[in-house]
Image (spheres, helix red, strand yellow):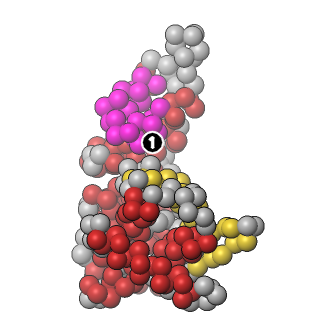
Amino acid sequence: MQELGVKPDQVTFVSLLSACSHGGLVEEGLRYYYSMTKEFNIPPRIAHCVCMIDLLGRSGRLTEAETFIKEMPIPPSDFVWRSLLAACKVHGNPELGRKAAENLIALDPSDDSAYVLYSNVCSTSGRWGDAENVRSQMGSRKVQKQPACSWVKLKNQVSSFGVGDNSHPQSPEIYKKLDELKKRIIEAGYVPDTSYALQDTDEEQKEHNLWNHSERLALAFALINTPEGSTLKVFKNLRVCGDCHSVFKFVSGILGRKIILRDAFRFHHFAGGNCSCSDYW
């Protein structure tokens, strides 16, 4: 653009910073951000700041992300705190996660996802007491968790699934397909991450609960009802579970199927055992 004499604008830099974040190009992203403000005199907007928190959070530079938020020229939005909270979950920092959650809840005390995400941070870190306290706060403040739901659209007909759903006419085939998938991906090296089973139960029960997640039911349904080799499309109303994300990667590699999963925050494109998000979302 510069060679052609086209001046980059604020949208240009959102694209650049987002690309750097997803590509793990931390130093390049920092350089673009500061050139935007110093060289091109473009004042940072909230979208640029969210990209920077995502950039630093992905790479585990959480202290720098916290400092960046403190020094932001504009008030941090819920997207900023949510991005930091997600990074705390990935990198196991419940202390900073608590700060992010408190700020997120202060902006919207009725936001169920803030409580759930922080509860997940605590559970993943093995802090079950803290996780239970968060859920108690939800109850005392009358905040209800939105039920998870996943769906598949085939031939203009939508089939939706809740957690442990048995209401679909093809339920027997769906659970049989899940058992088959479970055996195959275990043989390929899959190990369940039971930290995503958010109840403090024994490991066997946690694993069982994971295989009842709505996105797995939708995936099995799609596999049963689509032609071999076609791209599968699954939708979910909430953030995809990390262990389900791992299952989708394994399935895409073993079956040679491309899978598109649209959750509440982004598109995940699975192919050949990998995902377009590079395991950070």
Tell me the quarter of the image containing the N terminus. Answer: top right
Residue 172, image x and y in percent?
54, 88
Marks counted in the figure total 1
Asked if the stretch drawn in magenta spans residue 177, the answer is no
**Residue 68, above or below 258:** above
Image quadrant of residue 126? bottom left
Residue type at tag 1: Cys
Task: Label 1, secondary structure: give it.
Answer: helix
**Residue name at image x 39 percent, y 62 percent:** 254
**Residue name at image x 45 percent, y 79 percent:** 178
Q: Please, what is the dominant secondary structure of the magenta stretch?
A: helix
- Start-end of magenta stretch: 16-36
Residue tagged 1: 51
Residue 200, image x and y in percent?
30, 85
**Residue 190, above or below 46:** below
Asked if the stretch drawn in magenta spans residue 30, the answer is yes
Residue 203, image x and y in percent?
26, 84
Q: Is residue 112 left or right of residue 211?
A: right
Question: Is residue 79 in view from this perspective?
Answer: no
Question: Is residue 18 in view from this perspective?
Answer: yes
Q: Is residue 199 left or right of residue 108?
A: left
Identify the residue at the far right of this view.
Answer: 156
Tell me the quarter of the image containing the C terminus. Answer: bottom left
Q: Nearer the viewer, residue 227 or 72?
A: 227
Residue 58, image x and y in percent?
34, 48
**Residue name at image x 52 percent, y 13 percent:** 2
Image quadrant of residue 123? bottom left
